[in-house]
Image: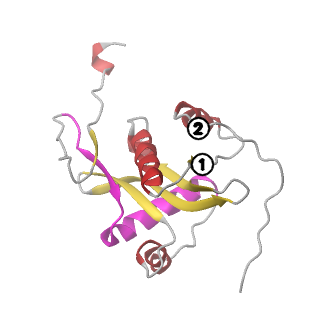
Amino acid sequence: MAAENHQEPRMLQTVTPTLQPVPSARAPMVTIRCAKPRDLAELREMVAELAAHHGDAATITPEQLERDLFGRTPWITALVAEAGGALIGYAILVPQYRAAEGARGMEMHHLFVRPGHRGTGIGRHLVAKAREQAKMAGCDYLSVSAATGNFQAHRFYESERFVPRPVTGMRYLQKLG
């Protein structure tokens, strides 16, 4: 690789109570943390960006997102990647259970990094933080799914030590109410 094309990696810092973020001289520091109420608008924007990427429309409202993240009975966990005061990526985690095995798990329902920040390691750091969150919650596994033809995602998840588990049947949905 020619010297003029070489880029220094961004400094990524997973924030825990014992670590302090370390700034980078070449790129803004990226912090991976749990979402806060102040993140709702930007988080909802990224959910819409991911839906649009897959040809869907995001119908979630800020109120629904607030309820599910910070309500009386939180339903999901959101991890965000922040750089320079702006959110540049996120992961949404949802609890799972495999009754036949008695195994608790966590589904990484969404993983998204804004286009200008892809390929910089942010997705890997979001996955690492998701793994950490699942372990702290007492989970036995972390799972994720990707569209059948999304080979780039398949390669990424396999490089992160996820093992492919092909779908063996149909999944059904029934609207309630």
Quadrant including the C terminus: bottom right
* Name of the residue lying farthest toward the right: 169
Could you say where residue 30 lies in the image, as x and y percent from the top left?
A: 28, 46
Q: Position of residue 76 (x, y in %)?
A: 50, 67
Of the residues under marks 1 and 2, which one precedes in the sequence? 1
| The magenta stretch spans residue 51 | yes
In the displayed structure, would residue 162 be above or below residue 14?
Answer: above
Q: Where residue 97 appears, x then y in whole percent?
A: 64, 60
Q: Rounded to the nearest whole Å, what is the CA distance between mark 1 and mark 2?
A: 8 Å
Local SS, label 2: loop
* Magenta extent: 26-55
Question: x and y percent of residue 162 in the render?
Answer: 59, 38
Q: Is residue 72 left or right of residue 163?
A: left
Q: Nearer the viewer, residue 168 or 12?
A: 168
Residue ID at (45%, 76%): 62
Instruction: Say which amino acid is labelled 1.
Output: Val
**In the image, 168: left or right of 9?**
right
Q: Is residue 79 left or right of residue 8?
A: right
- Residue topped by disc 1: 144
Q: Marks 2 and 1: in contact by CB < 8 Å?
A: yes
Quarter occupied by residue 57: bottom right
Residue matched to label 2: 162
Q: How many marks?
A: 2
On whether residue 49 falls in the magenta region, the answer is yes
Quadrant of the frame with the N terminus: top left
Residue type, numbered disc 2: Phe
Most extreme residue toward the top is 2
Secondary element type, mark 1? loop
Neighbor class of circle 2 (other Cα within 10 Å; few <14, some 14-19, many 20+) is some
Q: How is the image coloured?
A: secondary structure
Q: Nearer the viewer, residue 58 or 108?
A: 108
Q: Residue at x 68, y 47 (%)?
A: 147
